[in-house]
Image: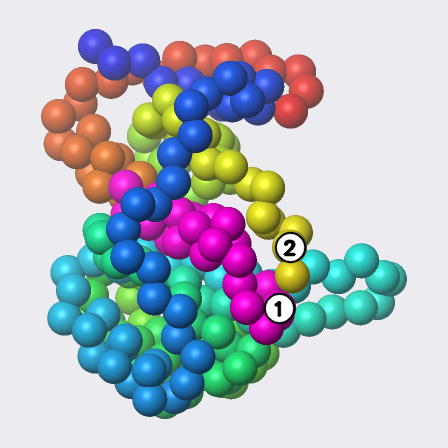
Amino acid sequence: MRVIQDKYDKKKIQTLPCIHFEGRIIVVFTERETDKAVDYLMQQPILGFDTETRPAFKKGQMHQVALLQVATHDTCFLFRLNKTGLTDSVVRLLEDKSITKVGLSLQDDMRALNQRRAFEPGTYVELQKEVKDIGIEDNSLQKIYANLFGKKIAKGQQLSNWEADILSEAQQRYAATDAWACIKIHEEVKRMKETKDFFVEKINIISQ
């Protein structure tokens, strides 16, 4: 019987081996590229979603969402929204109700994307709700992934400049990993629900 924790100790994450997306990463700069990328994604059975926004370090400063990353099992498209905006194709994808689309804190992502252009969000799977169904109380992608797979998603690029002219390889890999990890978590939770081969251990963590 497999044992997972209801709350994962953040200190343990630093001892785990790193995991990152090893598939194709395609950066999308233009409206034409966006059309082609969306046509490809609309043919896939499942998609992982995430966004990135340039961090604000001054009081009252805010930035619009700069990047939308959408992953399959082996390919991740990075839509540079600060250059293209929300094109008609991206809106078509966001409003789609036929494909399984998975993300974490989706309400925040949808709110940020709506500030670029109004649209009606289609059908999505919220991972925070999914993991709560099996007894995991953590809300962060890093903790959930560590709990289920025993590996660490590095967060070193989280506060980098997502509006840079060129995204570094480290930024691209970080962004793709977050979107791809959503698929991995969703499929593992689905498998666990079906097999019921796990036990949830109650952990008393005083400080996170």
Q: Which residue corresponds to the image point at 26% horizontal and 35% vertical from the top-left?
A: 189
Kindly tell me whether residue 116 is visible in this rendering. Answer: yes
Residue 58 within the magenta-colored segment of the rendering: no
At label 1, the amino acid type is Ala
Secondary structure mostly seen in magenta is helix
Residue of label 1: 164
Height in image: 41 above or below 133? Answer: below
Residue 179 within the magenta-colored segment of the rendering: yes
Q: Which residue corresponds to the image point at 69% horizontal and 71% vertical from the top-left?
A: 63
On the image, the x and y values in percent for residue 184 come to: 28, 41
At label 2, the amino acid type is Ser
Circle number at residue 160:
2
Boundaries of the magenta span? 162-184
- In the shown orientation, is residue 197 left or right of residue 148? left
User: Which type of secondary structure does the marked residue at label 1 adopt?
Assistant: loop
User: Which type of secondary structure does the marked residue at label 2 adopt?
Assistant: loop
On the image, the x and y values in percent for residue 1 come to: 21, 10
Query: Which of 175/45 is in front?
Result: 175
Looking at the image, do the residues carrying marks 2 and 1 touch, with CB atoms under 8 Å apart?
yes
